[in-house]
Image (cartoon, rainbow, N blue to C red):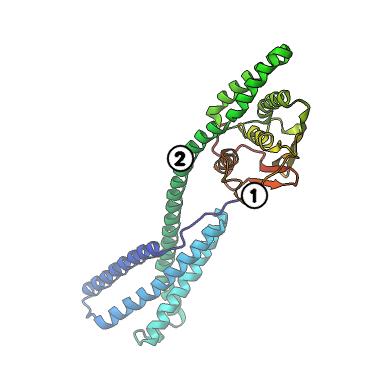
């Protein structure tokens, strides 16, 4: 998904700066004309000279504002550099001619210029002598505008990076708190204790799976904001599911459907386990003593689509609009996806009546700025 440059809607400071620069140029022009008159020992007609300078200054301000607005539109449209340079070169030629024509016209209307001086070759040479300065003023204004907005964008990006870093640290702490709900550990230990009397082999397997799961969760705790291959993520999830199936036996059924070409696609570490844990924790009820969970991962248009569904009791209708604000698991998952992918992801939770569907869509490429 392409992103356009976000620019401040206010041009006040930029326009003021360019106007100030243009005013200084006009002041130097006045000084140059005065010096020329002194060198030629000619008498200065101050009212006419000042009127000409004021006319030039006012028309220049009008064109500067138009140039700033036009240049800003090019920035918002995010055109290619080669095309931008060509367009501005053509615009500079056209604008400088129109600009000088406006100065001549207004001067004539105010009676400060002799129209017969600007006929035939005189008119052509007059344009050639004066439009070069206006051509350069156009380019200076455009350069100033681009510099202003790129510095502004750089400043905004620095602030955003700082905010993202703060968010990543906060999210990392919350994610560490939310992984492997304490009730899961207590229930697993109780199940192991019960199995020791009736099935020592299964109890040992459960201890081994729990140990491997805890080790991988701790190893991944420093990689919460990074991406891992899907195969590695599924290995963690499978150990978790085996433990839960040992606890719930035939009451829990898990259906796996994973596209084979997704094994090396990278996703956020420990993204899937909290969603399955939520389905188990909130799916069982008196009305739903048996639970079926579907874990379906597929590729579509360069994106990975994750569907985790269950046929349990579902969400209370009052919580449907607040699902990302209640409970640490889903809100943290949303925050992690936002930090890693910006606006290039989808995460929704939907009541199926019965059951719940968690849907996530993320790019099948590493998120920009993450360590792989």
Q: Are marks 1 and 2 in contact (CB under 8 Å)?
A: no
Q: For this rendering, which residue is in front, 73 or 263?
A: 263
Q: Quadrant of the C terminus?
A: top right
Disc 1: CA contacts within 10 A as few (<14), some (14-19) or many (>=20): few
Indicate the quadrant where residue 362 lies.
top right
Look at mark 1 in the image and give the residue it sits on.
320
Indicate the quadrant where residue 265 lies.
top right
Q: For this rendering, which residue is in front, 44 or 142?
A: 142
- Which mark, by number, is residue 166? 2
Placement of 143 over or under 360, stated as above or below: below
Placement of 285 over or under 145, stated as above or below: above
Q: Position of residue 334 (x, y in %)?
A: 59, 43
Q: For this rendering, which residue is in front, 165 or 256?
A: 256
Which comes sooner in the sequence, label 1 or label 2? 2
Q: Is residue 143 left or right of residue 324?
A: left
Q: Is residue 339 left or right of residue 200?
A: left
Q: Is residue 280 left or right of residue 185?
A: right
Count of numbered labels shown in the rendering: 2
- Residue drawn at x 49%, y 62% as measured from the top left: 71
CA separation in Å, label 1 and label 2: 29 Å
Q: Position of residue 184 (x, y in %)?
A: 62, 27
Placement of 94 over or under 6, stated as above or below: below
Disc 2: CA contacts within 10 A as few (<14), some (14-19) or many (>=20): few
Q: For this rendering, which residue is in front, 85 or 304?
A: 304
Could you tell me which secondary element the residue under label 2 belongs to?
A: helix
Q: Position of residue 193 (x, y in %)?
A: 65, 16
Could you tell me which secondary element the residue under label 1 belongs to?
A: helix
């Amino acid at each position: 998904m392409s992103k356009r440059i976000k620019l401040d809607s206010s041009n006040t400071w930029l326009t003021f700066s360019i106007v100030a620069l243009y005013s200084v140029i006009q002041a130097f022009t006045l000084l140059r004309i005065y010096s020329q008159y002194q060198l030629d020992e000619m008498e200065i007609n101050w009212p006419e000279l000042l009127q000409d300078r004021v006319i030039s200054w006012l028309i220049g301000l009008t064109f500067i504002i138009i140039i700033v607005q036009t240049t800003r539109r090019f920035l918002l449209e995010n055109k290619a550099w080669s095309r931008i340079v060509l367009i501005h070169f053509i615009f500079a030629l056209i604008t400088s001619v129109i600009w000088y024509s406006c100065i001549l016209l207004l001067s004539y209307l105010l009676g400060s210029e002799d129209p017969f001086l600007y006929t035939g070759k005189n008119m052509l040479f007059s344009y050639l002598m004066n439009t070069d300065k206006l051509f350069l003023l156009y380019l200076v204004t455009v350069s100033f505008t681009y510099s202003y907005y790129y510095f502004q964008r750089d400043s905004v990006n620095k602030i955003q990076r700082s905010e993202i870093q703060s968010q990543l640290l906060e999210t990392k702490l919350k994610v560490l708190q939310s992984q492997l709900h304490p009730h899961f550990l207590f229930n697993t230990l109780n199940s192991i204790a019960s199995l020791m009397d009736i099935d020592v082999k299964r109890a040992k397997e459960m201890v081994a799976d729990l140990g491997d799961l805890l080790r991988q969760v701790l190893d991944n705790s420093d990689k919460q904001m990074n991406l891992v291959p899907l195969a590695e993520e599924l290995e963690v999830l499978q150990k978790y599911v085996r433990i839960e199936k040992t606890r719930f036996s035939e009451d829990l059924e898990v259906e796996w459907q994973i596209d084979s070409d997704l094994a090396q696609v990278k996703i956020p570490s420990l993204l899937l386990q909290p969603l399955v844990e939520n389905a188990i924790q909130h799916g069982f009820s008196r009305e739903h003593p048996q639970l079926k969970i579907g874990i379906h991962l597929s590729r579509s248009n360069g994106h990975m689509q994750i569907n985790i569904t269950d046929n349990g009791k579902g969400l209370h209708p009052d919580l449907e609009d607040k699902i990302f604000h209640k409970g640490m698991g889903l809100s943290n998952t949303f925050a992690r996806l936002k930090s890693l992918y910006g606006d290039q992801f989808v995460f929704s939770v939907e009541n199926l009546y019965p059951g719940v569907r968690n849907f996530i869509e993320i790019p099948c490429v590493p998120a920009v700025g993450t360590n792989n």
